[in-house]
């Protein structure tokens, strides 16, 4: 019994939400399960444990310094960017992930997002629930643009288990499939392997299915977005860090605000008057709506591109904006 390992589960609730238990682990050692953990408490929770299971808690070099008995980190997800893998390798700590455990679920969710964007089912459902269709003078009720998926081009960045599953579904829908990966895969005659520039220029939809690395962090930035078609869609079911969200900070700064991007947000300091500006909406509903609200505090006129992007989440945004005193033309 003296040689039994200490096993710590850092964020068990994220892993199983109360639907599973960790009893099987007790065969291998003394198990401590935490439902959740603040990042500041990670090292203390690990203590002198040799085996650590994590889903979202970060295992950094500093955590490794504080937990010298750590031998193994099991990431209970496919993406392992929560661990400083290079530092773990240097120290001889084994790191594993759980590949292919959610392939079909993620592929399904990719198309749930795409179909919602094309068909506006959520927006129409809310309008029917609110009585707008019943009150309409016409049986054919159209307040949101709807598009067919067949014939559109989807560009896949990454072509592992999930990317391949998305490709199969896309082909079944009658879509044209482009793929950008370092090495084309054999047996996929129905898809076309292209460069990133070709994919960005030719796709109606760009869907991300690659791991997050230092090499591809913020790969979808302002320059990448500028190469895309007007009105195209970006779907990211991979890692948030693949997309550069600094466009909002850049837009605010251009208008005279004191704005700075943070690792997980945006810091905006008040006390400055905003001025006339041209804002790139980047086909992002969040940027467009935030900039519209900020424009109400400006002493000049703002031009915001991709204004129609608000339909993704707030179809009536511009009507509400005007009702509250905002002006558009």
Image (cartoon, rainbow, N blue to C red):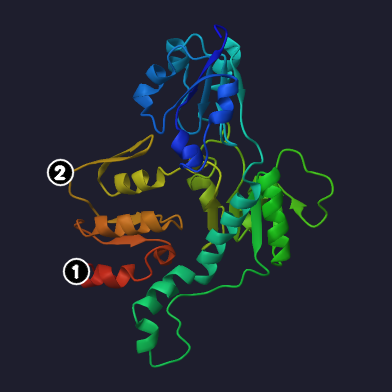
Q: Is 50 rendered above or below residue 11?
A: above
Residue placed most toward the observer, 77 or 13:
13
Q: Residue 325 carries which label?
A: 1
Q: Residue furthest top?
A: 2
Earlier along the polypeptide chain: callout 1 or callout 2?
2
> How far across and down, in percent of the image, does residue 326 sit?
23, 67
Q: Which residue lies furthest to the front in this view?
A: 1
Q: Quadrant of residue 87?
A: top right
Report which residue position mark 2 lands on.
Answer: 271
> How far across and down, in percent of the image, does residue 211 sit?
60, 37
Residue at figure coordinates x 19%, y 57% from the top left: 299
Q: Is 292 rendered above or below residue 266?
A: below
Tag 1, which secondary structure? loop
Residue placed most toward the observer, 313 or 179:
313
Residue at figure coordinates x 31%, y 55% from the top left: 290
Answer yes or no: is residue 83 visible.
no
> How far across and down, in percent of the image, does residue 321 sit?
26, 67
Q: In which quarter of the image is residue 96?
A: top right
Q: How many marks?
A: 2
Quadrant position of the C terminus in the picture: bottom left
């Amino acid at each position: 019994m003296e040689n039994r390992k200490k096993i710590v589960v850092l964020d068990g609730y994220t892993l199983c939400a109360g639907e599973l238990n960790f009893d099987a682990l007790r065969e291998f050692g003394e198990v401590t399960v935490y439902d959740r953990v603040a990042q500041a408490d990670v090292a203390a929770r690990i203590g002198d444990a040799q085996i650590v299971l994590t889903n979202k808690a970060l295992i950094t070099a500093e955590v490794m310094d504080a937990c010298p008995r750590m031998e193994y980190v099991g990431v209970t997800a496919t993406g392992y960017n929560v661990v400083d893998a290079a530092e773990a390798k240097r120290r001889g700590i084994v790191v594993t992930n759980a590949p292919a455990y959610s392939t079909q679920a993620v592929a399904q969710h990719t198309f749930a997002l795409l179909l919602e964007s094309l068909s506006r089912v959520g927006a129409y459902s809310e309008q029917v629930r609110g009585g707008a269709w019943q009150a309409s003078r016409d049986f054919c009720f159209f307040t949101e643009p709807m598009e067919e998926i067949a014939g559109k081009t989807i560009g896949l960045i990454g072509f592992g288990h999930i990317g391949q599953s998305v490709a199969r579904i896309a082909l079944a829908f009658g879509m044209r499939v482009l793929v950008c990966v370092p090495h084309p895969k054999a047996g996929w005659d129905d898809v076309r392997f292209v460069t990133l520039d070709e994919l960005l220029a030719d796709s109606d939809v760009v869907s991300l299915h690659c791991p997050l690395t230092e090499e591809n962090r913020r790969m979808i930035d302002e320059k990448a977005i500028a190469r895309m078609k007007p009105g195209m869609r970006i779907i990211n079911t991979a890692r948030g860090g693949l997309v550069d969200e600094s466009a909002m900070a850049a837009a605010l700064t251009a208008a005279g605000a004191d704005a700075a991007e943070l690792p997980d947000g945006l810091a905006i300091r008040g006390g400055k008057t905003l001025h006339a500006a041209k804002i790139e909406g980047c086909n992002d509903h969040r940027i467009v709506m935030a900039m519209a609200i900020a424009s109400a505090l400006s002493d000049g006129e703002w031009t915001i591109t991709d204004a129609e992007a608000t339909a993704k989440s707030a179809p009536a945004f511009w009507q509400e904006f005007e009702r509250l005193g905002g002006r558009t033309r």
